[in-house]
């Protein structure tokens, strides 16, 4: 690790303290559609939804999709100890806000099961605390672990799922999933930072529920050089990565010594656009990187949801938008850090 990376690592806890408490607001079945939406500006409260440029849309996120993403982000923030404290003392209060709410924690990890008013079950896993060196060691554990016959992952994330409270977590989740009647409820697994990698691990253990996985700034969990991980359904993983001033979230895009990688749909949040970026190459290591974007997910997801312009377009950035790589642009051409016309 070079001097710059060491300095940024040392400053990361201080950067997290800059996170401002944020209000509350939203995935599920993906709507595939190549037709531009919001083609007419519409009044939405006091806001005007922007005209949609003539681009090729990869897919769209409906209001239902964004509601689920927003709920996942709220739960990720709620159980992250550096933002909200330890979750065990908040269970009774949170049961006023959810149809079902259970939560657990131990020395390193926290998790929660919640059922929203829309009938969706959420299982959420906490990111690692900056102030807990044992938790940080778990996050950076260099060892491999075989998750299934064909899938190897980083051991720290396996340990963060297979905790002292795993049996209680599974019982609560099974109860939640059976609470919707003859058919199981929808299941969304989510996590911020290390919690996102834990959600990926959980999805393979819980694949009989066919969950969606929503991660915010998750580090790389998969060791594909040891196996192809066919047991992981990457079509149901939304991997959100922040970009700020041309800098990518270092936690989600760092070059790591494990040869680990991501699988799933890479979605870029830039804090300015009314659409979400969708680069073509999921496994590319993007740079330059910084820890600053790592603290911006909750505000940005809330901004998109509260704007109320649905469906949200997901695709390549339009001409004139900032970029670093050709595959980030709808035209396939990035020059001088700006998306160009074809």
Image (cartoon, grey):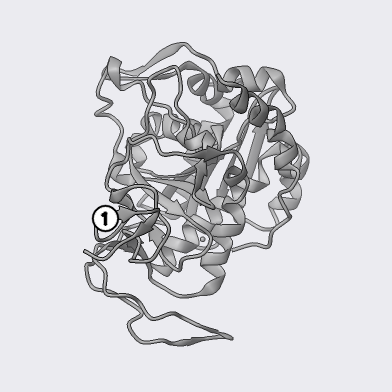
Residue tagged 1: 333
Quadrant of the drawing holding the C terminus: bottom left
* Rendering quarter of residue 27: bottom left
> Which picture quadrant has residue 5?
top right
Nearest the camera: 332 or 30?
332
Q: In front: 21, or 120?
A: 21
Q: Count residues near mark 1 (Cα–Cα under 10 Å), then give few for <14, some for 14-19, many for 20+.
A: some
**Image: 44 above or below 11:** below
Q: Nearer the viewer, residue 270 or 320?
A: 320
Direction top: furthest residue = 143
| Residue 311, image quadrant | bottom left
Which residue appears at 64% of the width and 22% of the height?
Answer: 136
In this rendering, the answer to whether 40 lies above or below 94 is below
Tell whether 323 sits left or right of 251. Answer: left
Residue 319 x, y percent position in the rendering: 33, 66
Name the residue at 29% across, 50% down. Answer: 326
Which secondary structure lies at badge 1?
loop
Residue farthest front in this picture:
336
User: Is residue 99 toward the left or the right of residue 34 in the image?
Assistant: right
**The N terminus lies in quadrant:** top right
Residue 131: x and y, percent?
75, 27
Q: How many marks overall?
A: 1
Residue 116 in sight here: no
Q: Tell which of 192 and 293 is nearer to you.
A: 293
Q: In the rendered image, is residue 42 in sight?
A: yes
Q: Position of residue 329 (x, y in %)?
A: 31, 57
In percent of width and height, residue 328 lies at 33, 52
Q: Residue at x 72, y 34 (%)?
A: 13
């Amino acid at each position: 690790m070079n001097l710059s990376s060491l300095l940024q690592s040392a400053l990361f806890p201080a950067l997290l303290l800059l996170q401002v408490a944020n209000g509350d607001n939203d995935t599920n079945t993906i709507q595939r559609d190549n037709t531009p939406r919001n083609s007419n500006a519409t009044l939405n409260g006091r806001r005007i939804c922007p005209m949609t440029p003539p681009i090729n849309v990869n897919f769209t996120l409906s209001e239902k999709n964004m509601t689920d993403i927003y709920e996942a982000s709220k739960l990720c923030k709620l159980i992250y100890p550096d933002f909200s404290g330890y979750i065990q003392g908040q269970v009774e209060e949170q049961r006023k806000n959810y149809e079902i709410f259970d939560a657990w924690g131990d020395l390193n990890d926290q998790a929660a099961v919640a059922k929203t008013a829309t009938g969706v079950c959420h299982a959420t896993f906490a990111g690692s605390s900056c102030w807990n060196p044992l938790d940080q060691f778990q996050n950076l554990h260099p060892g491999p672990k075989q998750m299934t016959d064909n899938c190897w992952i980083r051991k720290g994330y396996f340990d963060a799922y297979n905790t002292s409270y795993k049996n209680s977590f599974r019982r609560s989740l099974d109860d939640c999933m059976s609470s919707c009647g003859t058919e199981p409820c929808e299941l969304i697994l989510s996590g911020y930072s290390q919690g996102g990698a834990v959600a990926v691990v959980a999805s393979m253990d819980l694949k009989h529920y066919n969950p969606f996985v929503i991660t915010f700034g998750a580090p790389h969990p998969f060791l594909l050089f040891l196996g192809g991980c066919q047991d992981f359904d990457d079509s149901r993983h939304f991997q959100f990565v922040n970009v700020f001033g041309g800098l990518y979230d270092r936690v989600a895009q760092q070059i790591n010594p494990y040869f680990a990688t991501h699988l799933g749909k890479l979605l870029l949040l830039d804090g300015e656009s009314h659409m979400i970026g969708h680069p073509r190459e999921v496994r590319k290591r993007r740079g330059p990187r910084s820890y600053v974007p790592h603290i911006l997910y909750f505000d940005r997801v809330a901004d998109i949801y509260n704007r109320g312009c649905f469906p949200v377009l997901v695709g390549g950035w339009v001409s004139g938008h900032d970029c670093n790589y050709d595959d980030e642009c709808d035209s396939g051409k990035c020059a001088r850090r700006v998306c160009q016309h074809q």
